[in-house]
Every structure is written in structure tokens, then in C-alpha cells.
Image (tube, rainbow, N blue to C red):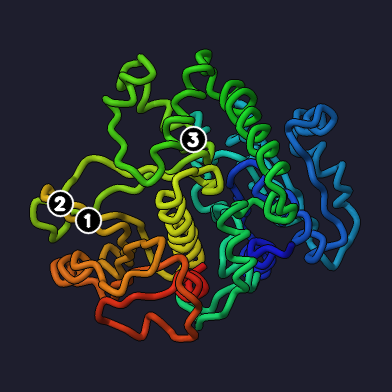
């Protein structure tokens, strides 16, 4: 399965000499994409994983030992590439990487991969600012499934995905192994094992959380509340913990790509809701309720898009939702350079009537586009971004035009 991120890595080193940081959920395909891209760029590339005992011994000997291991003393037309995986688990990883890059950036290129937000492990010392570009790797989405190539602009022309492929993506999620297997039994086993590894290995070992049982309960409740407003006090009562503890644990779950939060947009919205975020899962296949799964599915596509557009330099993009105290709501708003760009309301089945809230909030905040995205509607080969009035659009069309 070819991934967009292989092209991103290739493009990065063709244009930049900075380190590349690639973070994303466990088993999303970071190592595979980094290795494939490295192999295309040079014959001389090395992969070292902090979790591997032998690799860890090499890393702990220091930067010179690593570069000696790479044998970069030889003259080469191609710059060697070093991939360091899960290095953030090393207590002094930031200073280590800084020294490695500052000393050897003329001799080698560096890819740093990790299954957590790499910036959560800052432990003091000098900043890495100006030495790397960060990228977040997301699960497979409709547009990437159709084409793994880089996008020349934010929006591309629509391309049809087969109904079977679309349904498999919705059902099994965008993580490579269950998506390729297309087996309910395999998917169930894979999800269970991945959850155990995430909570009982990654988070427990690195964040030193002792009460893993209650953290697992919290993770399960969050999955059940996907696409809903997140009220920390209610969650605290359910797991019998303080609000501060719940908030801290959700921050941890978010940092390890279990879930993500979308906050409300409040500018130019009369009596807007300005506090409660909505929560979604990185693996939408684990969401049971059909309506919530549909909304999570779209949210994941939009989050991937705003990350990609921002990381590739198209502008500063953010994802929000809109809700006021009269409970008028639109599921999503994408902003560009702090200005509303387009609104999205998600529907599981076709409705010939468009949501009046799309009209209300579009006029109120001045968004250019306003879409009612319908999951079970047939593909239409029309550029929905040609429309400036609120329109109903198939998810198969809309999602093929973003990332």
C-alpha cells in the first residue's frame, strides 16, 4: 500500500537539509513509509529503534558511534539517511538529536519517528527550532487511497472511489493492516492488542501512570462519547477521579494519538459556546454508533487535511465546530489564516433539505463555502468548491477533493 508520506519524505530531502520529524499513532505506517522513502533516496540508509536492545546500545554510545556504524567516511554521491525510531523514549533525546544534527548534518540526513507528539518530551536545554520540519502521519483516507501523490494546492478535482473501497475504509478504518485484511475477526483482535500496547506499554512506561485500569475505563468512555461534547466534571464522576486528573489523562491520550479534541469557534458568533471541546478517535472503526462514526470519519479527514495543508506551507489551517447557547450547531469549520473558509455538516443518509444552520452561520461568520456532506449519497463528478452557497454534496465527492 503506497502512502502519501513517502512522497512527503522524498520531497522534504530534495528541498531541505533539515531533520524530518514524523509522528503519528502506533501502527499507522511510519516505519514502513520512512524506510521506503529512504531506500528511494539513497542506497545507504540505517534504521535504529530505541525499543531494540542492540540498537539502543549503539545509540547510547553517542553520535560518533552511530555515524561510524553508518560508515559515512566513504565518498558517496548520495547523502546517507539515518532513521531513529521511538528515540523520544530516551530521557535526553532532544539534546542528543541536537548534537547529532549540529555535528553531522553536512554528512547525513535524519528522520525521527515516534508514536507520540514529539514535543511532549521537552526536558529543558536548547531548542531544536530551525533544525527540523514536523509532519503528522494519519491513517489512510479517501483521497490518499485514490492517489498517494503530493497535492499542488489545497483542493483537487474530484475522483471516484469504488463503493466497496469506501465502505471498507469506513468499516475497518484507515490503519494499513486491518484495512488490507478486511476481516472483522482480525480487526477485533488487532484493535484489542493495539489498545493494550498503547495503554499498558507506551503510556504506562513513559508517562508513569500507575492507575492504568481507570485510564482504560476513561479511554472506553471517550470512545463511547465520540463526536460529543466533552465535559470533564462528568467524566471525573464516572471514573471517580478529580477533574485535574481527568484533564491530564485526556492530554496524555491525545498526545499518544488515541483521541483528538476540536474546540468551538467563537469569533463573530453571537452567544457562542466558548469552552467545551468535542472529542474524536484516531481510529474511527472502533466507534459503534453509526451517526457518531460518520461524524468521526469526516472529522479525521478534515484534521488530516488541515495538518497537511499547514505542514506543506499552504497557510495556517485549523479545525473547529460551531455551537451557540441556543444549541444551534454546525459540525465543523475549517479556517485558513485565522479566517473562516468552509463549514461542514455531516449526515449519514440523504436529506433533500439542507440544514438551516449552514445558512445562519455562513452569513454570520463570512465563510466562503458551506457543505452538507452525506455519507450514503452517490459520487458526483463536480467540484463542490465551485459553489459559494450552501449545498448538499456526497462524502465520496467531498473527501476525494481534500486529503
Q: Is residue 12 left or right of residue 238?
A: right
Task: Give the residue drawn at x 39%, y 75%.
Answer: 393
Residue 208, image x and y in percent? 54, 18
Q: Is residue 340 left or right of residue 16?
A: left
Separation (CA) of disc 2 from disc 3: 33 Å
Q: Which residue is mark 2?
A: 324
Badge 3: residue crowd in 10 Å (few <14, some 14–19, many ≥20): few
Task: Give the residue drawn at x 41%, y 61%.
Answer: 348
- Identify the element where label 3 is drawn: helix
Q: Is residue 186 left or right of residue 12?
A: right
Q: Nearer the viewer, residue 16 or 90?
A: 90
Q: Residue furthest left?
A: 270
Q: Relative to 6, does residue 262 appear above or below in the rendering? A: above
Q: Which residue is mark 1?
A: 329
Q: Nearer the viewer, mark 1 or mark 3?
A: 1
Task: Give the residue drawn at x 51%, y 81%.
Answer: 158
> Which numbered disc, 1 or 3, marks the residue that appears first in the sequence?
3
Separation (CA) of disc 1 from disc 2: 7 Å
Amino acid at each position: 500500500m503506497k502512502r502519501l508520506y513517502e512522497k512527503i519524505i522524498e520531497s522534504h530531502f530534495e528541498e531541505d537539509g533539515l531533520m524530518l520529524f514524523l509522528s503519528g499513532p502506533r501502527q499507522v505506517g511510519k516505519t514502513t513509509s520512512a524506510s521506503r522513502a529512504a531506500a528511494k533516496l539513497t542506497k545507504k540508509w540505517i534504521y535504529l529503534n530505541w525499543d531494540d536492545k542492540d540498537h539502543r546500545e549503539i545509540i547510547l554510545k553517542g553520535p560518533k558511534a552511530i555515524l561510524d556504524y553508518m560508515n559515512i567516511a566513504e565518498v558517496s554521491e548520495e547523502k546517507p539517511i539515518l532513521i531513529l525510531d521511538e528515540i523520544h523514549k530516551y530521557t535526553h533525546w532532544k539534546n542528543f538529536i541536537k548534537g547529532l544534527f549540529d555535528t553531522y548534518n553536512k554528512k547525513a540526513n535524519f528522520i525521527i519517528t515516534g508514536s507520540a507528539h514529539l514535543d511532549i518530551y521537552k526536558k529543558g536545554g536548547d531548542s531544536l527550532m530551525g533544525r527540523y520540519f514536523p509532519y503528522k502521519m494519519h491513517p489512510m483516507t479517501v483521497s490518499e487511497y485514490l492517489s498517494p501523490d503530493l497535492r499542488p494546492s489545497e483542493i483537487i478535482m474530484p475522483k471516484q472511489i469504488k463503493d466497496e473501497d469506501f465502505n471498507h475504509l469506513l468499516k475497518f478504518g484507515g490503519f494499513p493492516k486491518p484495512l488490507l485484511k478486511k476481516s472483522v475477526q482480525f480487526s477485533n483482535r488487532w484493535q484489542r492488542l493495539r489498545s493494550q500496547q498503547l495503554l499498558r506499554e507506551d503510556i504506562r512506561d513513559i508517562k508513569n501512570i500507575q492507575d492504568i485500569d481507570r485510564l482504560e475505563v476513561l479511554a472506553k468512555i471517550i470512545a463511547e462519547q465520540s463526536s460529543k461534547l466533552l465535559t470533564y466534571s462528568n467524566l471525573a464522576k464516572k471514573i471517580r477521579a478529580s477533574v485535574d486528573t481527568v484533564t491530564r489523562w485526556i492530554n496524555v491520550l491525545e498526545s499518544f494519538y488515541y483521541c483528538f479534541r476540536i474546540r468551538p469557534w467563537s469569533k463573530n458568533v453571537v452567544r457562542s459556546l466558548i469552552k467545551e471541546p468535542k472529542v474524536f478517535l484516531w481510529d474511527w472503526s472502533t466507534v459503534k454508533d453509526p451517526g457518531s462514526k460518520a461524524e468521526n470519519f469526516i472529522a479525521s479527514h478534515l484534521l488530516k487535511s488541515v495538518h497537511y495543508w499547514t505542514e506543506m506551507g499552504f497557510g495556517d489551517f485549523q479545525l473547529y465546530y460551531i455551537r451557540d447557547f441556543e444549541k444551534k450547531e454546525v459540525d465543523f469549520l475549517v479556517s485558513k489564516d485565522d479566517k473562516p473558509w468552509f463549514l461542514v455538516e455531516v449526515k449519514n443518509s440523504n436529506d433533500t433539505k439542507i440544514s438551516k444552520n449552514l445558512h445562519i452561520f455562513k452569513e454570520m461568520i463570512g465563510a466562503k463555502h458551506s457543505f452538507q456532506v452525506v455519507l450514503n449519497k452517490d459520487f458526483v463528478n463536480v467540484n463542490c468548491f465551485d459553489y459559494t452557497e450552501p449545498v448538499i454534496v456526497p462524502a465520496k465527492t467531498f473527501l476525494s477533493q481534500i486529503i
